[in-house]
Amino acid sequence: MKRPLFACLAALWFSLAQAGTGLTELPASATDGPVTVYYPSSAADAPLQRGPFTLHLAWQGAPVRGNGRLVVISHGSGGSPWVHADLARTLVAAGFVVALPEHKADNYKDPSVPGPESWKLRPAEVSRAIATLAHSPQFGPLLSVDKVGVFGGSAGGHTALTVAGGRWSPTSFKQHCEAHIAEDFSSCVGFITRLRGNFLDGIKKSAALGVIRQRFDDATWYTHTDPRIQAAIASVPFAADFDMTSFNAPRIPLGLVIADQDINQVPRFHINAVRAACPPCEVIAEFPQGGHGVMLSPLPPFPAGSIADELMGDPPGFDRRQLPAVDRKITGFFRRYLLVQP
């Protein structure tokens, strides 16, 4: 006797309700770091300590098939897989597998080579992470990687813009910093120091420009095309080194997350310049009170008064309770463009 339809649906709902968010790490290869993977799992979530965070995940839980699609998250400079856990959980709840490659020499274990030298490597690292998942005995049978999404924030946003069809050059980075070192100082020097409005500012600017002029004289236009990547979202990206005309007609659907109070990547030089150049781009979210760390969730416990806290911490008045709704919008964007049938 066949089971009634409602009984089958009830059983399916129950199984999904009991499912957890699996977490595992695929090992490093000879050329790349490990890939952290969040995925639908039949195992139950449990408290799991990772760095300063207590997350609720199913460590190495058995994977189950979700919607068959992959989203790759490209972390920011010095970033970790854990600061994107809340977004990853929302994506997994919608059936996605989420992979975070560890970008070489620009991650929380080794932050030694940030900036343009990392940006040259990151898009290919994303492509190789896709291949790693596709060939994994654990995840390959559960995925179709002909339609993959990419989400990235800050330096990861630079990666997302590149895979969407943007072209950039280290010389453009140098030219931006020469023209706007005072207004966009943190974009040019990172977390080393800040301008404080005192007699040292001139020394800091001169020293920074000396290093930048010495290191970044490569006028090559860098691009990266991976036909498997079919949608991308750039959140608070470094973008001032792009040829903005390359965003007039992006290769794929491109979403933007904007934080109006970002003092690390000042919007008018970066994401708002992309927005103005890109009529097809979709603004997923704009946070009038948000800072550069807006999409880090959970937010790291930055030491009070540190440069990281100044540049990445939430500005006064920012309400993090709005982030789950934005995570759902991001998920909806990828559902629209990755789950469409040919």
Image: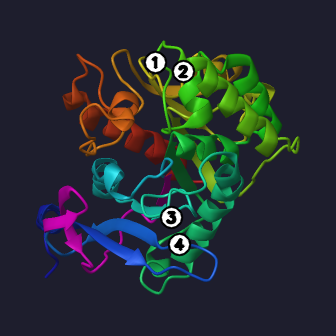
The range drawn in magenta is 46-74
- Compare marks 4 and 3 and give the one earlier in the sequence: 4
Residue annotated with mark 2: 200
Under tag 2, what secondary structure? helix
Q: Nearer the viewer, residue 159 or 284?
A: 159
Marks 2 and 3, Cα distance to the nearest angstrom?
38 Å
Which disc, if any, is residue 300? none
* Residue at 60% from the left image edge and 44% from the top image edge: 160
Q: Is residue 8 visible?
A: no
Q: Nearer the viewer, residue 36 or 277?
A: 36
52 falls in the magenta region: yes
Q: Please name the residue that numbered disc 3 is placed on.
A: 101
Q: Which residue is mark 4?
A: 33
According to the image, what is the colour scheme of the structure?
rainbow
Q: Are marks 4 and 1 in contact (CB under 8 Å)?
A: no
Asked if labels 2 and 4 touch by Cβ distance under 8 angstroms, the answer is: no
56 and 187: which is toward the camera: 187
Does the CB distance between marks 4 and 3 fall below 8 Å?
yes
Residue wearing tag 1: 196
Mark nearer the viewer, 2 or 3: 2
In the rendered image of this protein, does residue 6 appear above or below residue 138?
Answer: above
Q: From the top left corner, tell me how far across and down residue 200 is, in percent.
A: 54, 21
Residue type for callout 2: Leu
| C-alpha separation, residue under disc 4 versus residue under disc 2 | 39 Å
Per the model, the C-alpha gap separating discs 4 and 1 is 37 Å
Q: CA distance from mark 1 to mark 2?
A: 8 Å
Query: Does 251 sit left or right of 24 as displayed?
Result: right
